[in-house]
Image (cartoon, rainbow, N blue to C red):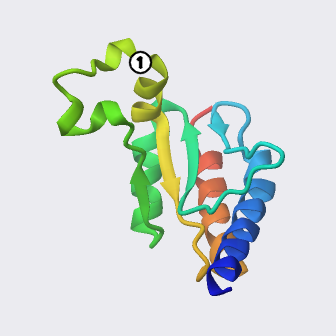
Amino acid sequence: IRSKQIIKKRQKNAAYLTKKLAPLGKEDFYMQLPTVSRGVEHAWMFYPIMVSEHVRDDLALYLEENGVQTRMIMPLTNQPVYKDWMREKDYPIAKQVNECGLLLGCHHFLEKKHLDYMVNLISTFNHALPR
């Protein structure tokens, strides 16, 4: 039962992030948010986003400098065990994820104020980009 409560809280956090971040993915700041197919349940270990390649590392650094942990998404083509037989050029979507993917937290210990802080940082970063 505890695991169901944890998953529900993570789902609530992910839905909140989607609602709050959706308006930011415009103009020069491309941002693709995750979606979940109808009839599918997601446990949301992380909240994955895709951003413009030219801003991904700067956004991650900005969030980290302001106390928000991030992680880069690591598709199989990035894993050392596969490097000898999986060439990234053969997997263009994995290459794009390697270059543009970023993981944000949405775990069950995050409260609305934490999510709002993260959203506000991303919004501030977006508005500070040169136009």
Q: Is residue 19 left or right of residue 51?
A: right
**Is residue 80 placed above or below 60 in the rendered structure?**
above
Badge 1: how crowded within 10 Å, few (<14), some, or many (20+)?
few
Identity of the residue drawn at 81% across and 56% down: 19
Q: In which quadrant of the rendered image does the C terminus lie?
A: top right
Q: Is residue 1 left or right of residue 66?
A: right
Task: Pinpoint residue 121: horizontal percent, then vertical percent.
Answer: 59, 62
Task: Pinpoint residue 12: horizontal percent, then vertical percent.
Answer: 76, 69
Give the residue at mark 1: 91
Q: Residue furthest top?
A: 90
Q: Residue furthest bottom?
A: 2
Identity of the residue drawn at 56% across and 49% down: 48
**Is residue 9 placed above or below 46 in the rendered structure?**
below
Identity of the residue drawn at 77% across and 42% down: 37
Q: Residue furthest front?
A: 1
Identity of the residue drawn at 56% across and 39% down: 50
Task: Pinpoint residue 30: horizontal percent, then vertical percent.
Answer: 64, 33
**Is residue 25 placed above or below 47 in the rendered structure?**
above
Name the image quarter holding residue 4. bottom right
**Is residue 116 placed above or below 15 in the rendered structure?**
below
Q: In which quadrant of the rendered image does the N terminus lie?
A: bottom right
- In terms of depth relative to the viewer, which is nearer, 80 or 14? 80
Q: Tally the numbered discs.
A: 1
Name the image quarter holding residue 87. top left
Q: Secondary structure at mark 1?
A: loop
Task: Pinpoint residue 95: horizontal percent, then vertical percent.
Answer: 40, 25
Q: Is residue 86 left or right of residue 59?
A: left
Name the image quarter holding residue 94. top left
Amino acid type assigned to the residue bearing label 1 in the image? Tyr
